[in-house]
Image (cartoon, rainbow, N blue to C red):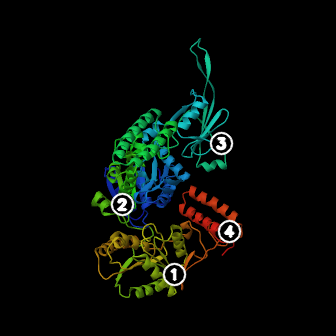
């Protein structure tokens, strides 16, 4: 049973949204929309709906960082339920590819994040064993994962009194891809004289099997004859593998358990033998086709690569890149969709899906298949992979839709697709903010003398100690405008796609701290930015129709000023485009409803107060990138910066690097990726920087 834990109660129009969505789910409405403005408490509403509907829930987010944020929030809302996080487990990923015109083969190169891999296994194991499951996932949930039925069937059932020798048990564990090690680690086991200790791939379950003589009645004269077997099974639950470094696990005696595989895409010995024969058959047919086309080099390459993989599968039941043979291992027909995380949900019966920021997530899901297919088609054409590798893929959009049962799209600006799918009667609006804040006021100014007008508006806001965001159409415009404003004495910086993620986050934090009063950007100032100090948004060339000036982008950009009591937007335009009309209409409609609610309930709007530390980034006395009157100057420092995370003091370089490395690893385990990336960047700069503070 889902039980929400929170000190908050639904307010504003949250109760209506919760009631409407829950009623829709219980009356079998397949598609619904939660249209919720920024700051209205959409996550809390989703949590209340989950509590009332009481079904396993999948929440899809469009990137790892936002997914991690949602995961933490739902973990707090449901501390006694199984809330898990499922994203791509790569820290770095270079997919296998081939570039024909330069004859360049790029081998797959990746670095697996052990913590993310652990969380993926924790997800699938929870789906195998519990019903009160909430999974927050990225689009990784539509990628090939292997059959849930085979995953479950491959589990090793062990019980007290089971006849099995230590060597037989070890062989079975190795077959499930557990590795023997001296140290007890995730997906590994260790053996002492009469015990085998094992940690599951989820890193949260430790098992200890004691082996020795067990007695059963013999056939002759009804005597008890000793044989080897499992005398006792102990189990300990832990939060994470690192817990064993500081304390001993607390074991409890159990009678039986099932040990699930340490890796995906495993299958039984008899099935893998059949799969290998099918792979050989496909190989023969493909080589014949390649030779007929005069591609002798490609045929030889494919034969060598495939036979090596077959040899590894015969010996260990596994090979590097085994997912490329998953069609044969799953006994799927050519072109049939792969098994994904959605199939693990389907195996439970009825489930519920939420797509967060659907106006971004839906196009992302829609586009995954085509990019993957294009890359792998080239590999197949030039003899690097069998044609069946094309079936190791993400789901096509129609396949995804077919697997989804009941769905709620969540966005402040849902797309036409979502609105059409749901229909007007199935849209729940959540426009009221608990703080009483209103959507910003809007004015339109001509483009002639727009910079002069902008400068006057900027100075007014600075005098009130408020911040300003200016959006331009191009990177060059952002840089030029920033330099011009800097020459007039304005503290300003710019953001665009060439600014690295870490640098971008640091600039935004310094913006909140007041090191800058103005940020000029292109398309980096929309979803996910929480900057309550911003009271003015200036949109240059607002009448240039296109992606950067469509209705969705305009509303999302305007929303950045909705966390300040003096929120205001200036659109510089010489004509009223359809996008401007729609954005103004929608923002004004929302504002009127918010004003009426405040008036009826005697609510006085208040600017959101948010601790700057919530960015989880270091604070520097001097920004890494600053705009001065003579343009951009860079300062590089290490060892003497005041920092929220750590004060370096005058410690040695090695000591600083060691301490930062520990903090980086800890942040990664807690899924605080922004902090981990920042620490990694600091480590790099310290290692490559001057030996003395700059």
- From the viewer's perspective, is the residue at label 3 or at label 2 nearer? 3
Q: Secondary structure at mark 1?
A: loop
Labelled pair 3, 1 in contact (Cβ < 8 Å): no
Name the residue carrying label 2. Answer: 363
Q: Are marks 3 and 4 in contact (CB under 8 Å)?
A: no
Residue at numbered disc 1: 465
Instruction: Please tell me the numbered disc located at residue 419.
Output: none
Q: Earlier in the sequence, mark 3 or mark 2?
A: 3
Q: Secondary structure at mark 4?
A: loop
For the residues carrying marks 3 and 4, which lies nearer the camera in this image? Answer: 3
Q: How far separated are the C-alphas under marks 2 and 4?
A: 45 Å
Picture quadrant of residue 546: bottom left
Give me the residue at 29% from left, 57% from top.
Answer: 421
Residue situated in front as seen by the camera: 508 or 90: 90
Q: Residue at x 58, y 49 (%)?
A: 239
- Mark 2 and mark 1: span between their CA atoms? 39 Å
522 or 137: nearer the viewer: 522
Q: Which residue is mark 3?
A: 182
Q: Toward the viewer: 639 or 315?
A: 315
Any part of residue 524 in sight: yes
Q: Nearer the viewer, mark 1 or mark 4?
A: 4
Distance from Cα at disc 3 to Cα at disc 4: 36 Å
């Amino acid at each position: 049973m889902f039980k929400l834990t929170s000190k908050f109660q639904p307010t504003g129009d949250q109760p209506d949204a919760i009631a409407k969505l829950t009623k829709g789910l219980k009356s079998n409405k397949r598609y619904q929309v939660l249209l919720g403005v920024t700051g209205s408490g959409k996550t809390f509403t989703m949590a209340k709906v989950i509590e009332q509907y009481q079904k396993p829930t999948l929440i899809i987010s469009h990137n790892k960082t936002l997914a991690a944020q949602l995961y933490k929030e739902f973990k707090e809302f449901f501390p006694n339920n199984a809330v898990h996080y499922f994203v791509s487990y790569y820290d770095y990923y270079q997919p296998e590819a081939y570039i024909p015109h330069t004859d360049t083969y790029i081998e797959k190169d990746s670095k697996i994040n052990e913590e993310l891999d652990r969380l993926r296994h924790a997800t699938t194991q929870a789906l195998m064993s519990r019903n009160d499951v909430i999974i927050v996932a990225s689009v990784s949930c539509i990628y090939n994962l292997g059959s849930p039925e085979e995953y479950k069937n491959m589990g090793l059932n062990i019980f007290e009194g089971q006849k099995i020798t230590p060597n037989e048990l070890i062989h079975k564990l190795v077959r499930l891809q557990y590795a023997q090690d001296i140290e007890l680690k995730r997906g590994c086991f260790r053996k002492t004289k009469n015990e085998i200790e094992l940690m599951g791939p989820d890193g949260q379950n430790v098992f200890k099997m004691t082996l020795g003589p067990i007695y059963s009645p013999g056939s002759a004269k009804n005597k008890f004859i000793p044989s080897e077997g499992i005398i006792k099974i102990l189990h300990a639950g832990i939060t994470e593998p690192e817990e064993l470094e500081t304390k001993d696990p607390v074991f409890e005696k159990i009678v039986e358990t099932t040990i699930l595989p340490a890796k995906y895409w495993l299958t039984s010995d008899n099935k893998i033998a059949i799969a290998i024969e099918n792979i050989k058959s496909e190989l023969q047919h493909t080589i014949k086709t390649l030779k007929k086309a005069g591609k002798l080099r490609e045929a030889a390459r494919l034969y060598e690569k495939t036979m090596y993989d077959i040899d590894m599968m015969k010996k260990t039941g596994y090979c590097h890149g085994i997912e490329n043979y998953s069609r044969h291992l799953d006994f799927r027909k050519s072109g049939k969709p792969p098994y994904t995380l959605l199939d693990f949900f389907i195996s439970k019966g009825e489930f519920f899906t939420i797509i967060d920021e659907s106006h971004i997530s839906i196009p992302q899901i829609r586009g995954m298949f085509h990019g993957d297919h294009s890359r792998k088609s080239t590999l197949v054409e030039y003899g690097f992979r069998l044609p069946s590798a094309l079936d190791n893929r993400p789901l096509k959009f129609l396949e995804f839709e077919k697997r989804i049962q009941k769905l709620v799209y969540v966005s402040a600006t849902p797309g036409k697709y979502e609105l059409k799918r749901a229909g007007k009667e199935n849209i729940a609006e959540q426009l009221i903010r608990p703080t009483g804040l209103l959507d910003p006021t809007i004015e339109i100014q001509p483009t002639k003398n727009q910079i002069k007008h902008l400068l006057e508006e900027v100075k007014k806001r600075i005098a009130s100690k408020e911040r300003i965001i200016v959006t331009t159409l191009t990177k060059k415009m952002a840089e030029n405008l920033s330099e011009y404003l800097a020459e007039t004495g304005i503290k300003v910086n710019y953001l665009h796609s060439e600014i690295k993620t870490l640098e971008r986050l640091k600039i935004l934090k310094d913006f909140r701290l007041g090191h800058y009063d103005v940020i000029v950007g292109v398309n980096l100032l929309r979803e996910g930015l929480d900057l309550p100090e911003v009271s003015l948004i200036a949109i240059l060339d607002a009448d240039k129709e296109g992606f950067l000036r469509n209705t969705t982008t305009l509303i999302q950009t305007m929303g950045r000023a909705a966390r300040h009591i003096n929120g205001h937007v200036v659109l510089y335009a010489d004509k009223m485009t359809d996008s401007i009309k729609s954005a103004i209409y929608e923002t004004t409609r929302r504002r009127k409803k918010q004003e009426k609610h405040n008036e009826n309930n005697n609510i006085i709007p208040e600017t959101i107060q948010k601790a700057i530390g919530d960015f989880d980034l270091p604070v520097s006395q001097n920004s890494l990138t600053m705009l001065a009157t003579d343009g951009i100057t860079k300062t590089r420092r290490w060892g003497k910066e005041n920092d929220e995370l750590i004060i370096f003091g005058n410690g040695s370089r090695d000591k600083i690097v060691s301490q930062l490395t520990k903090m980086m690893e800890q942040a990664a385990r807690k899924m605080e990726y922004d902090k981990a990336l920042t620490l990694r960047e600091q480590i790099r700069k310290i290692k490559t920087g001057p030996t003395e503070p700059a």
